[in-house]
Structures are given as structure tokens and as C-alpha cells.
Amino acid sequence: LAAGREVVVSRGQLIEIGGSFRVPDVVGQSGARLREVGTTNRTRLSDYERALGPDTGAFLRAHPSNFRTVGFVEDVEVEALCELAGSAGVPVIDDIGSGALAERVPELADEPPVRRSVAAGASVVCFSGDKLLGGPQAGLMVGAPEAIERCRRHPLARALRIDKLSLAALEATLRLYRDPARALRDVPVLAMLGASEDALSGRAEAMRGALSRAGIEARVIRASAKVGGGALPLLELEGPVCAVEPGGIGVDRLTMRLRAGDRPLVARAREGRLLLDPRTLDDDGANAAARAVIAALS
């Protein structure tokens, strides 16, 4: 969209994503020239206005999915940036990161919604097909038809397109979002984020009971966890977990045994105990986790 011209980016959004890919390097590889505006912690609309000129090819926004800058900070809302860009005939490319499509999910309040950027008028909105969207690993682009069509015609588009199985999985995931209530129930990442206290307590207690009946010391405590996966870095998921005493083998050896099982079990180790978090398990998974711990300690 901006090859041979300037791509204007806030200095606060010159981020590095997984795999050591950096925004300045990506812009350079595209054939565009990077034009930095603002500062690391504060960028205003006037910074973008001063950067506008005949050589401006695009405005680029990049959401810091896996970190946050807090305190004395300021940035430009997508609506204001799109309005400025639209008046100058400049496209806005908005990389919003984790792909928050679900609505009315309190845990997603810190993530930019896909619909908001599209409604604001961004020409291209980029986001992940996995992470918070809950589908297969993929990159998605939506936005203005003419801009998306230009991306589709680029020679790299064919080389980078996902395989048919991943495409089918993505379609199945997106179909769930047509019924918002069903998406909250059936998309695993959304179900985990929104799990009720009663459901979590029931699974944690079920694991504790199974372990206790096998002679293993375990109790239900409260603990905090992170979402992970490069999303929601400030969100603490607090709730009940099943804390297992590893006995004489120690927690490090116990975790190694569980990871090396025929059906690997990855649990958290905290203060010498093994934590089984019911948020990442359904009822069958909680029973299977308890059985795996019993086998590892037998």
C-alpha cells in the first residue's frame, strides 16, 4: 500500500513481536520508508498532522499486545487518526494484535476490538486468527475492499496463504461468532476467560477429592494466573486451584514426569507445590489431570 513512500508510525509503537520481528525492519522490507512521530510515551494527533505530506503512503498503528506502557502516556484513538487520514486520502493500517472479536467480555476490555477499527475506517486491520480469537494460527486482514484486494494481488499473498485444513478450522471458529452466546461457550479461550467461580471451584474440588482418595495431599487454594499467548499482559486471572504436595520426589521432578507422560500434563509449580488450574480444563480434563498426577506419584 505504501511501497516507495513514507509509513508514519508513533515511536511508542515501534515494537518487536515474537520471533524478533521488529516494525522498522518489516516496514523496510516492504519497500516503504519509516517516518517516526511523537515520543516513546506520548504521541498526539498534531504529530501525525505535521508528518503529512505528498510523500505520505500510510499511517501505521501497532498495538503492544504483550506489554503495556503505563503512567505518563498518551496516544491517538483510531477514530481520530482515521478521520485525519481520510481527509488527506491516506490509508490507515491498524495492527491490533490478538484479534478480539467477542463483545461484552470484561476480561477483553484492554484489547482493541476488531469491529471498532473497521468502523473507524481503517483501510486494513490486521490481527491473529488464534490467540484471543481462538482459531488456528494465522494472520487475518479485514477492511476496505479496495485495500484488501490490493493485498490479495501481491505476489507474496499466494506464498503466505494458509492451508485448507487451517482455513476450514478458521471458518468453523468464525461461524461460532455469528451466535455471540455460543461463541462465549464454545470457543475455548473465551470459555476459559469467562469461567464462573462455581465451575472453577467444582473442578478444583473434584481434583482434590480424587487425589485425596489416592492418598495424595492436596487442597484447594486461590492463586493468580496470566493469559499468556502474547495477550492481556496486565490481566490477573484469580481463582481456585488444586495445590498438590509432591512428596519426596519434589515439585521439579513431578512436573518433569507429567510433561513426559503419554498424554503430557503441563502444570504450574509454585512455592514447592504443583498447581492444577481448573480454568484450562473441562470436567473430563480435570479428571484426567488428577489421574495423571496419581500415576506420576505412584
Image (cartoon, rainbow, N blue to C red):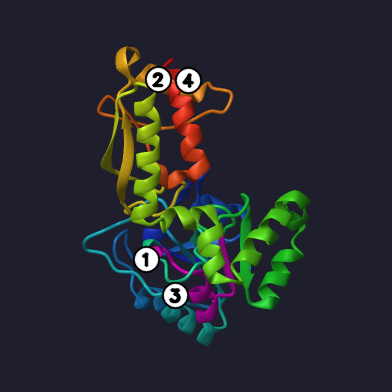
The span from disc 4 to disc 3 (Cα, nearest Å) is 53 Å
Name the outermost residue toward the left: 72
Q: Which residue is labeled 3 in the image?
A: 78
- Residue 1 appears at what percent x and percent y? 64, 68
- Which residue is more in the foreground, 73 or 242? 242
Among the two numbered marks 2 and 4 on one chain, the one whose residue lies closer to the N terminus: 2
Among the two numbered marks 1 and 3 on one chain, the one whose residue lies closer to the N terminus: 3
Residue at left offset 69%, top offset 61%: 171
Among the two numbered marks 1 and 4 on one chain, the one whose residue lies closer to the N terminus: 1
- The segment highlighted magenta reads 108-127
Residue at left offset 25%, top offset 28%: 271
Relative to residue 167, is residue 56 depicted above or below?
below
Under mark 1, the amino acid is: Pro
Q: Are marks 1 and 3 in contact (CB under 8 Å)?
A: no
Relative to residue 186, is residue 204 depicted above or below?
above
Q: Does the image show residue 58?
A: no
As drawn, the label of residue 295 is: 4
Under mark 2, the amino acid is: Leu
Under mark 3, the amino acid is: Val
Q: Are marks 4 and 3 in contact (CB under 8 Å)?
A: no
- Residue 81 appears at what percent x and percent y? 44, 77
Name the outermost residue toward the bottom: 87
The span from disc 1 to disc 4 (Cα, nearest Å) is 38 Å
Magenta includes 126?
A: yes
Among the two numbered marks 4 and 3 on one chain, the one whose residue lies closer to the N terminus: 3
**Dot 4, how many residues are within 10 Å of its Cα: few (below 14), some (14-19), or many (20+)?**
few
Q: Which residue is labeled 1 in the image?
A: 106
Among the two numbered marks 3 and 2 on one chain, the one whose residue lies closer to the N terminus: 3
Q: Nearer the viewer, mark 1 or mark 3?
A: 1
Left or right side of 239 for 101:
right
Q: Which residue is labeled 2 in the image?
A: 254
Q: Quadrant of residue 3?
A: bottom right
